[in-house]
């Protein structure tokens, strides 16, 4: 018995229409990212304390205490919102991203924005890890932030991968 040297049988899995597999995986990946963003957005409002440590102090506006003069240290120029406002704004951004990533016409732009958002969140995760190892840090906070920080890398790469169009019209060898 001889094996075919050409045709669909010789190509094995490539005989399955790759034009269907590429877009299907892309849509599945986008749906999974959308679900993750939606869950995270909801958690911003259900449990804002989960995010308190990852909002850097330099971003947080220090509102004056009623009846006291504000003679403390000057605020950082980026301190536009309170910590709770930053948490709410980032939750709203994740909610918008969850919707945008599901819409193929908006996916590339949304994936680019999500990549930038996750990259910007790195500063908060680094700051939280540094503070966890500071004088007020605890072993639990060290563990939590030591896990949260490296999780940003796969999220950034995943969001970036969603910028690429599905491989529906490409030919083998990368030319299409």
Image: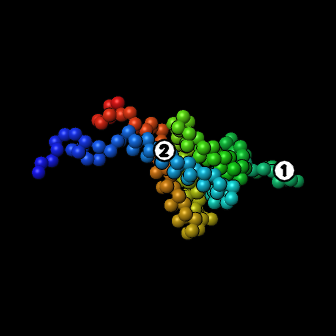
- Label 2, on which residue? 27
Quarter where residue 26 is shown? top left
> 64 and 47: which one is in front?
47
Direction front: furthest residue? 1
| Mark 1 and mark 2: Cα distance apart in space | 55 Å
Q: Residues within 10 Å of mark 2 (few under 14, many from 20)?
A: some
Rendered view: 43 above or below 96: below
Residue in the image at 32% along x and 34% along y: 171
Quarter where residue 99 is shown? top right
Q: Is residue 35 left or right of residue 18?
A: right
- Label 1, on which residue? 69
Percent of width and height locating residue 134: 58, 62
Residue 174, which numbered label?
A: none
Q: Looking at the image, can residue 75 be seen?
A: no
SS of the residue under disc 2? helix
Percent of width and height locating residue 7: 22, 39
Q: Looking at the image, can residue 65 be seen?
A: yes
Residue in the image at 64% along x and 57% along y: 43
Q: Residues within 10 Å of mark 1 (few under 14, many from 20)?
A: few
Percent of width and height locating residue 36: 55, 53
Looking at the image, is mark 1 or mark 2 nearer the viewer? 2
SS of the residue under disc 1? loop
Q: Is residue 105 left or right of residue 169?
A: right
Percent of width and height locating residue 19: 38, 39
Quick check: marks 1 and 2 in contact, CB under 8 Å? no
Residue in the image at 44% along x and 44% along y: 24
Residue in the image at 65% along x and 54% along y: 42
């Amino acid at each position: 018995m001889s094996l075919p040297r050409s045709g669909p049988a010789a190509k094995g899995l490539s005989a399955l229409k790759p034009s269907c597999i590429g877009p299907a995986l892309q849509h599945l990946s986008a749906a999974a990212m959308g679900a993750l963003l939606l869950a995270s957005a909801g958690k911003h409002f259900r449990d804002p304390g989960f995010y308190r440590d990852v909002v850097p102090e330099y971003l947080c506006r220090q509102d004056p205490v009623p009846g006291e003069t504000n003679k403390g240290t000057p605020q950082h120029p980026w301190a536009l919102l309170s910590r709770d406002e930053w948490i709410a704004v980032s939750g709203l951004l994740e909610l918008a991203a969850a919707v945008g990533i599901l819409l193929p016409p908006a996916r590339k732009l949304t994936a680019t924005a999500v990549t930038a958002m996750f990259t910007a969140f790195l500063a908060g995760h680094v700051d939280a890890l540094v503070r966890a190892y500071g004088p007020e840090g605890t072993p639990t906070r060290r563990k939590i932030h030591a896990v949260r920080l490296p999780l940003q890398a796969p999220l950034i790469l995943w969001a970036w991968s969603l910028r690429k169009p599905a491989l529906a019209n490409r030919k083998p060898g990368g030319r299409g």
